[in-house]
Image (spheres, rainbow, N blue to C red):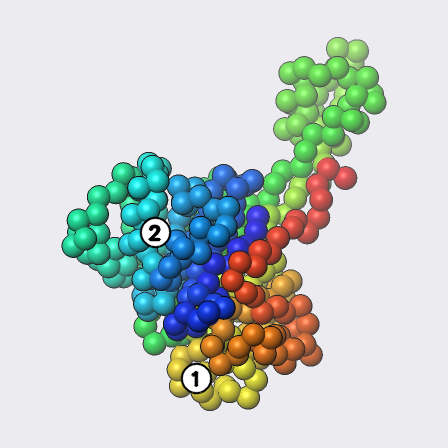
Amino acid sequence: MQIEFLGTGAGSPSKSRNVSSLALRLLEERNAIWLFDVGEATQHQILNTTIRPRKIEKIFITHLHGDHIFGLPGLLSSRSFQGGTEPLTIYGPVGIKEYVQTSLRISESRLSYPIKFVEITDDGELFSDQTFTVYAKHLDHKIACFGYRVVEHDHPGELRVDKLRALGIPSGPIYGQIKQGKIVTLDDGTVLNGQDFIGQPQKGRIVAILGDTRKTKNAVELAQDADVLVHESTFGKGEAKLAHNYYHSTSVQAANIAKKAHVHLLLLNHISARYVGKTANDLAYQVRDIFPNTKVVRDFSIYDIPFKNKGGE
Ligand SMILES: [Zn+2]
């Protein structure tokens, strides 16, 4: 599981930062990519990565401002042109369906795959399957905006084959029963408790990816105990008033949320063009006393999200 940033700038593109988009790379977990926001030229950014558009399984849109959605029609068309046939689901605020369908209809674009739209109105669980559950909650922006909490389900412990072999138990159907944690009796009368032969379960990872927002308690709830929180920092220290007026956040507000929510790593994105080059790093430096594990991300940065504990021990 990795996060790859495709666009990390606020509002309009600059030479060093494209507009908002990031990819949650779930290639090992489900052979898929999930995109969060698709600002203009996201597909051009993708050309500089190893991401293949047909692997994009889900797209989560935080809100309908142009710098977060103007790249959608082009990306969707290219995915089709490149032979994508797998269905795609797009989640987002009410209006996302009309926006995409209208763009495609007027440009007479036909897609080779079906799109399922899920328009969000209420806070709560958005989607759940074998491996992941995703929640959405309202944020506080000028238009309806959502933050997402991606929760990976815990992985059950692995069967300790080494331990079974050490006891001279040959592999066979009995391994399956032991793996289920059952109590089994061997031919020679030995009783084994399956639980003794299963490694530690691996705790699933949690990632919170937020859209544009003022400081809001929903951000803390979305980020609770997350391994990674991606939070906007359109403004810096001492600019809380400006941030409030423009429905955005400061680096200090983001850091306070990360601290309150006990997250492990805070990644600041949606960086204003006023913070050019290395001065953007000041946004993280400003909050080193509040939340030291803070990074200002750049386009094409990739962050690995490791498991907290290794199973099987
Ligand atoms: Zn924005």
Q: Secondary structure at mark 1?
A: helix
Q: Nearer the viewer, residue 37 or 76?
A: 76
- Could you tell me how far apart the alpha carbons at marks 2 and 1 are, in whole angstroms? 33 Å
Q: Is residue 182 above or below residue 284?
A: above
Residue labelled with disc 1: 244
- Could you say which disc has been placed on residue 267 in the image? none
Which residue is pictured at 39% across the width and 82% down the height?
246
The one nearer the camera, 70 or 171, is 70
Q: Quadrant location of residue 52?
A: top left
Q: Residues within 10 Å of mark 1 (few under 14, many from 20)?
A: some
The location of residue 8, given as percent across then percent down, is 48, 66
Residue in the picture at 73% in, 37% down: 312
Q: Quadrant of the C terminus?
A: top right
Q: Amino acid at mark 1?
A: His
Relative to 50, say whether 238 is above or below: below
Residue 7 in the image, given as x and y percentages of width and height: 46, 63
Give the mark nearer the N terminus: 2 vs 1. Answer: 2
Residue beneath label 2, please? 75
Residue 59 x, y percent position in the rendering: 39, 52
Q: Nearer the viewer, residue 218 or 116?
A: 116
Queried on whether the Cβ of the residue with tag 1 lies below 8 angstroms from ligand 1, the answer reads: no
Q: Amino acid at mark 2?
A: Leu
On screen, residue 163 versus residue 262, left or right, reads right
Q: Is residue 218 visible?
A: no
